[in-house]
Image: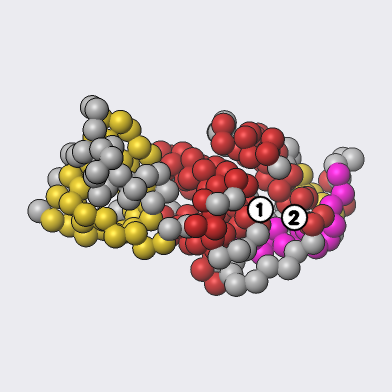
């Protein structure tokens, strides 16, 4: 049965001398597709079945089995990302993170993922967009943030700072020498959690606030998710 599906290639696996298997991330989940002869120099699939190709794929669909590729129409070449080592590293990290989240959740996270990638391609700050996606993924990982009250006493008043090790907001009464962040950082972190990614068009956030939020999320992920991603470590070294 021929089926049309839109998605992005997130993995390539060599198969024999001239073929490959690709894993396509779509709003239906991951789909495995056999690409016969795609590694051949004369194959029309050689350039269109590379990792991070986003397009419309026509496949001979087989449920719960490998489908077979019929044709590909590239919809967005993601040129800006692929021509910038930093942006490409963000794409690689966010893709690896997304695949890990998929292993632990049955929820459809494709729209948030692909919309984030498009926003980065359009020129929005990759650190901000990546942090927003990281925050939204925490719920699917079962370690969502409580951004309504102090994590120690539950008070909604006098929030002083945030701390990744303690897991969220800290009020003045529960403060134990944690690093004090800017008041704007506390406000923006909450905005990250509730904003719809597709609605974001402009981002004006100070460097210090961005760095404080990123540091908080790095610590939180390390302490509460159990994820160890090589692409994240590479990104940190690159930056």
Q: Nearer the viewer, residue 68 or 149?
A: 68
Q: Is residue 134 above or below residue 55?
A: above
Q: Is residue 210 left or right of residue 133?
A: right
> Would residue 186 be counted in the magenta stretch?
yes
**Dot 2 crowding, Cα within 10 Å, few <14, some 14–19, many 20+:** some
Residue extent of the magenta highlight: 179-194
Residue 126 visible, this orientation: yes
Q: Is residue 103 above or below residue 173?
A: above
Q: Which mark is residue 210?
A: 2
Residue 221 in percent (x, y) is at 63, 39
Could you tell me which residue is drawn at 55 percent across and 47 percent down? 88
Name the element at disc 2: helix
Marks 1 and 2, the one that precedes in the sequence: 1
Q: Is residue 217 left or right of residue 195?
A: right
Do the CB atoms of the residues marked 1 and 2 lie less than 8 Å apart? yes
Could you tell me which residue is drawn at 60 percent across and 38 percent down? 232
Image quarter of residue 11: top left
> Would residue 94 be counted in the magenta stretch?
no
Residue 90 visible, this orientation: no
Label 1 sits on residue: 127
Could you tell me which residue is drawn at 21 percent across and 54 percent down? 71
Name the element at disc 1: helix
Residue 157 in percent (x, y) is at 80, 61
Residue 193 in percent (x, y) is at 61, 59
Q: Is residue 34 above or below residue 153?
A: above
Q: Nearer the viewer, residue 78 or 205?
A: 78
User: What is the C-alpha distance between the residues marked 1 and 2?
Assistant: 8 Å
Query: How many discs mark residues in the rendered view?
Result: 2
**Dot 1 crowding, Cα within 10 Å, few <14, some 14–19, many 20+:** some
């Amino acid at each position: 049965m021929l089926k049309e599906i839109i998605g992005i290639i997130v993995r390539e696996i060599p198969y024999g001398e001239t073929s490959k298997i690709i894993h396509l991330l779509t709003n239906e989940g991951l789909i495995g597709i056999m690409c016969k002869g795609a590694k051949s120099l004369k194959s029309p699939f050689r350039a269109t079945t590379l990792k991070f190709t986003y397009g419309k794929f026509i496949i001979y669909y087989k449920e719960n089995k490998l489908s077979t590729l019929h044709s590909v129409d590239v919809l967005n070449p993601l040129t800006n990302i692929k021509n910038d080592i930093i942006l490409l590293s963000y794409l690689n990290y966010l893709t690896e993170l997304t695949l890990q989240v998929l292993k632990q959740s049955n929820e459809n996270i494709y729209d948030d993922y692909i919309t984030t990638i498009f926003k980065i391609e359009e020129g929005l700050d990759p650190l901000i967009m990546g942090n927003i996606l990281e925050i939204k993924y925490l719920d699917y990982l079962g370690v969502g943030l409580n951004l309504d009250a102090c994590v120690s006493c539950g008070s909604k008043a006098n929030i002083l700072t945030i701390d990744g090790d303690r897991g969220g907001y800290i009020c003045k009464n529960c403060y134990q020498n944690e690093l004090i962040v800017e008041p704007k950082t506390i406000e923006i972190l909450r905005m990250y959690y509730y904003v719809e990614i597709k609605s974001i068009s402009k981002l004006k956030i100070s460097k210090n606030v961005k760095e404080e939020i990123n540091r908080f999320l790095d610590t939180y992920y390390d302490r509460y998710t159990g994820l160890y991603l090589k692409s994240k470590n590479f990104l940190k070294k690159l930056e």
